């Protein structure tokens, strides 16, 4: 006769569960619970289900799980974690999303990450040593075991639908909450990270109707559904969401993911409502969790560039540092060495229609298999979407936006000015009025006059000599007023943030203005650029353009909708038109597929887009990546802004204000 086997390691959960089963279920089923079976005897027993009841985190849990997995026996965990109990997930052979996934989520939540970091630094303490004994009131435990018995009965029924399939019940203070257990990309049991291979890079774009024609999105993401899928303070992939600003005109939020190595990945969002801001922050941190380091593949290609030259793109095509100019504080960076072995990953060249190799440290901005970096990388070109086509399109937008802004700043190009036309949407006009009420004159500029895709920069200048004196934002989008709106949103966020900065921070900015070698991160860049004393740095743009003709947004970009097939409402046709246009202008669009198991199970896609020859964003004084980028130096001459092709010595020495 088939039976249930109970393994337990303490005086609370196991005995109480056995007593509750005998009281509630023994008379309604012939299946009994075997309580005295050893792990070695398990393969001699006809087992339908193993229940793992553990009062406290220990090696015992892993021993039971390992044995059941080797014998392909389903397991229902009931785990005590201090004053909380976890019921589930119901683990069945071959199905991702298991007890180990749950344990990794719990260990890497904000609270446990802080404890592990603090105590680990103090004495090398492991997470097991921080475990608390299980403790719960008699009334709460009675309700818990009723839940457990109901789950067991549901599992045993042929047509049963157990709640614990793909979910865990987080039970505390008599409150039960069923939370999805997404497969964890780090889980050794689920094994969701294959060795890298050209086939993993292969891309074939598919048609999909737009759900949002203005934003060019194929899915309207529901915030509550997104939150249910990804957020929980104890066992969520995202364990922290902060609403750190809720001004009447603009809300801001932040979301955080913590990795097993102790890294904090942050995403920031803003919007007209708290919900919009939190959703934006969650999507950004999910995107960055995929771009931080390889989460969907194991890099296995190592060697010198010359060994892979036929299949690889040379790193200089993506821009290298001027290493001899780097401050000594960046000693961890080393020059790219043609004779040194590096880690490479497979990406997809849309121009050649083949997989290509690129350096791993240009595909990810976090830790890689290389001992040292030869470039600083960022999330530039990383994007998340409801389909891979949507993600690639918005990744291209980000690359073009940063390239246009940096080309303007580094080469001091007085790019064409734009004016708002008759078709300005109400929400964009409202944002302009808000900035005007705060004392800012807003001017708009066309950032990529050599391209037809709208790339817009908004510059806000305070009418008085106040901080922040000048602030900027930029965006790229095929819908011109979406680009304008995005640029104004970035500008507005910076105005709110800088206005709130304390005097001590402003003093730091003044010190960095005097000694730019101390400019290190993204917040330093815009803090310095916003100083009244930094305002003259904008003269090449704000003064020179007043003598040039000005066109409306509509006039400048009147052909964009037709050129990029917006009327088709098909994301593939729109993306194909954008990619073809860039190919025609001599560019390749290289795509790194970065979708993690977590995003894949939620129906989302993540990519990093790189366009060889375009200027990448970097932060920190002297860290510009301009070596090898001929377009940056030739473009001002081609557009008539310079009398000759520029050299590195001609570039703007002032740190860019992009943030």
Image: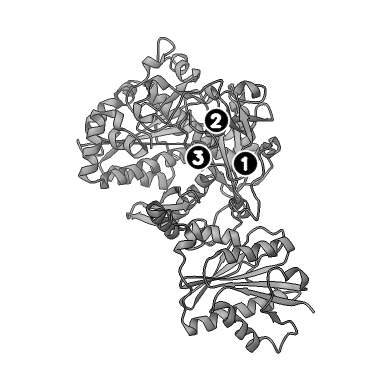
- Among the 4 quarters of the image, the one containing residue 190: bottom right
Q: Name the residue rendered at 40%, 16% in the picture.
A: 648
Q: Dot 3, crowdedness within 10 Å: few (<14), some or many (≥20)?
A: some
Q: Name the residue rendered at 46%, 38% in the picture.
A: 483
* Quadrant containing the N terminus in the rendered view: bottom right
Q: Is residue 438 above or below residue 318?
A: below
Tell me, yes or no, whether the two marked residues, 2 and 3, touch with CB atoms within 8 Å. Answer: no
Chain-order first, disc 2 or disc 1: 1
Q: Which residue is mark 1?
A: 298
Chain-order first, disc 3 or disc 1: 1
Q: Nearer the viewer, residue 582 or 44?
A: 44
- Residue 415 percent location from the top left of the image: 40, 24
- One can see residue 447 in this view: no
Tell me, yes or no, whether the two marked residues, 3 and 1, touch with CB atoms within 8 Å. Answer: no
Q: Which residue is mark 3?
A: 367
Q: Nearer the viewer, residue 98 or 503?
A: 98
Q: Nearer the viewer, residue 574 or 565?
A: 574
Element class at badge 3: loop
Q: CA distance from mark 3 to mark 1?
A: 13 Å
Q: Which residue is mark 2?
A: 559
């Amino acid at each position: 006769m088939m039976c249930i086997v109970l393994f337990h390691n303490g005086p609370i959960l196991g005995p109480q569960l056995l007593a509750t089963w005998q009281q509630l279920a023994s008379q309604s089923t012939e299946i009994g619970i075997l309580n005295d079976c050893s792990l070695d005897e398990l393969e001699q027993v006809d087992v339908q289900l193993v229940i793992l009841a553990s009062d406290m985190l220990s090696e015992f849990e892993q021993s039971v799980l390992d044995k059941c997995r080797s014998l392909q026996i389903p397991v229902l965990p009931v785990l005590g974690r201090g004053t909380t109990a976890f019921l589930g997930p119901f683990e069945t052979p071959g199905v991702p999303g298991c007890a180990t996934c749950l344990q990794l989520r719990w260990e890497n939540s904000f609270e446990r990450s802080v404890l592990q970091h603090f105590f680990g630094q103090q004495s090398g303490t492991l997470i097991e040593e921080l475990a608390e004994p299980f403790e719960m009131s008699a009334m709460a435990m009675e309700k818990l075991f009723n839940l457990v018995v109901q789950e067991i009965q549901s599992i045993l029924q042929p047509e049963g639908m157990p709640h614990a399939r793909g979910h865990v019940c987080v039970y505390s203070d008599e409150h039960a909450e069923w939370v999805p257990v997404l497969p964890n990309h780090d889980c050794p049991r689920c094994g969701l990270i294959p060795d890298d291979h050209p086939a993993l890079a292969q891309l074939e774009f598919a048609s999909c109707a737009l759900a949002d024609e203005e934003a060019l999105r194929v899915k309207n993401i529901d915030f509550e559904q997104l939150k249910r899928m990804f957020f929980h303070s104890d066992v969520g992939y995202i364990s922290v969401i902060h609403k750190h600003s809720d001004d009447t005109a603009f809300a801001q939020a932040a979301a955080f993911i913590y990795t097993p190595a102790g890294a904090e990945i942050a995403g920031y969002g803003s919007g007209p409502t708290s919900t919009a801001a939190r959703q934006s922050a969650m999507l950004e941190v999910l995107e960055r969790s995929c771009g931080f380091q390889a989460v969907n593949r194991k890099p296995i290609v190592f060697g010198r560039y010359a060994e892979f030259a036929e299949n690889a793109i040379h790193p200089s095509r993506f821009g290298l540092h001027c290493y001899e100019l780097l401050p000594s504080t960046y000693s961890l960076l080393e020059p790219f060495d043609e004779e040194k072995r590096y880690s490479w990953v497979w990406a997809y060249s849309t121009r050649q229609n083949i997989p290509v190799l690129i350096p791993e440290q240009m595909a990810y901005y976090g830790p890689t298999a290389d001992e040292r970096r030869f470039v600083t990388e960022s999330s530039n070109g990383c994007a998340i979407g409801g389909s891979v086509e949507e993600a690639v399109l918005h990744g291209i937008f980000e690359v073009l936006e940063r390239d246009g802004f940096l080309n303007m700043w580094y080469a001091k190009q007085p790019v064409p000015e734009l004016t708002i036309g008759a078709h300005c949407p109400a929400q964009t006009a409202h944002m302009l009025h808000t900035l005007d009420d705060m004392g800012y004159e807003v001017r708009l500029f066309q950032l990529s006059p050599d391209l037809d895709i709208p790339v817009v920069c908004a510059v806000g200048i305070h009418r008085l000599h106040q901080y922040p004196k000048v602030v900027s934002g930029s965006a790229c989008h095929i819908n011109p007023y979406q680009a304008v709106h995005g640029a104004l949103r970035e500008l507005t966020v910076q105005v709110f943030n800088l206005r709130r900065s304390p005097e001590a921070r402003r003093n730091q900015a003044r010190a960095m203005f005097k000694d730019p070698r101390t400019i290190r991160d993204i917040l330093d860049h815009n803090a310095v650029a916003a100083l009244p004393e930094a305002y003259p740095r904008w003269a090449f743009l704000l003064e020179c353009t007043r003598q040039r003709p000005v066109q409306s947004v509509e006039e400048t970009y009147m052909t964009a909708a037709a050129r990029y097939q917006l009327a088709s409402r098909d994301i593939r046709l729109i993306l194909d038109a954008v990619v073809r246009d860039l190919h025609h202008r001599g560019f390749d669009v290289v795509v790194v597929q970065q979708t993690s198991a977590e995003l894949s199970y939620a129906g989302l896609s993540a990519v990093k887009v790189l366009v060889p020859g375009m200027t990448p964003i970097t932060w920190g004084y002297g860290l510009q990546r301009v070596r090898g980028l001929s377009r940056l130096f030739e473009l001002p001459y081609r557009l008539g802004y310079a009398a000759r092709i520029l050299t590195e010595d001609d570039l703007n020495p002032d740190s860019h204000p992009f943030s």
